[in-house]
Amino acid sequence: QVQLVESGGALVQAGGSLRLSCVASGITINTKQMAWYHQAPGKERELVATVRAGDRTTYADSVKGRFAIFRDTAQNTVYLQMNNIQSEDTGVYYCNLKNLISSAEYWGRGTQVTVSS
């Protein structure tokens, strides 16, 4: 059974930093696309960043230069380093794993980030 477990969410001041983690079990991440999504209060879930095999990354315009996605395949873990956090970054962050061949997709339950001004 595939499970994704996020952690690292917290209350943080604007301008601060956080590192979110997502540990995968029941599947290896090294050949899969891993992604982080953000759901702000009252809004739809939006893609923040992706990382694929070969460590190719993509970012939403709103986080470019502030966030970084990377993974440790030995730990089967993907991270989201969040720097210069802003109030609009408040919300729940979800980890996503996608098999680009089969289109099978899995989600974690999310971790809450709250930004105080």
Image: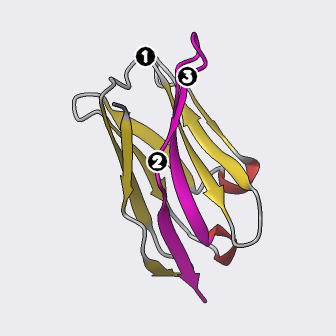
The secondary structure type at the circle numbered 3 is loop
At horizontal 30% and vertical 28% (from top left) the residue drawn is 26
At horizontal 39% and vertical 59% (from top left) the residue drawn is 19
Label 2 neighbour load within 10 Å: few <14, some 14-19, many 20+: some
Dot 1 amino acid type: Thr
Establish if 97 lies above or below 53: below
Q: Tell us which disc is closer to us: 2 or 1.
A: 2
Figure colour scheme: secondary structure
The secondary structure type at the circle numbered 1 is loop
Instruction: Point out the image quarter for the N terminus.
Output: top left
The secondary structure type at the circle numbered 2 is loop
Instruction: Point out the image quarter for the C terminus.
Output: bottom right
> Which of the numbered marks, if any, corresponds to residue 15?
none
Establish if 76 lies above or below 99: below
Residue bearing mark 1? 31
User: Magenta region: which residues?
Assistant: 90-117
Let me know if residue 98 is in the magenta part: yes
Residue 30: x percent and y percent? 37, 21
Dot 2 amino acid type: Gly
Residue 6: x percent and y percent? 39, 53
Toward the top, the furthest residue is 101
At horizontal 47% and vertical 80% (from top left) the residue drawn is 12
Left or right: 8, with 115 as reference point:
left
Question: Magenta span: helix, strand or loop, mainly?
Answer: strand
Residue bearing mark 3? 104
Q: Which residue occupies the foreground of this view, 31 or 61?
A: 31
Residue bearing mark 2? 108
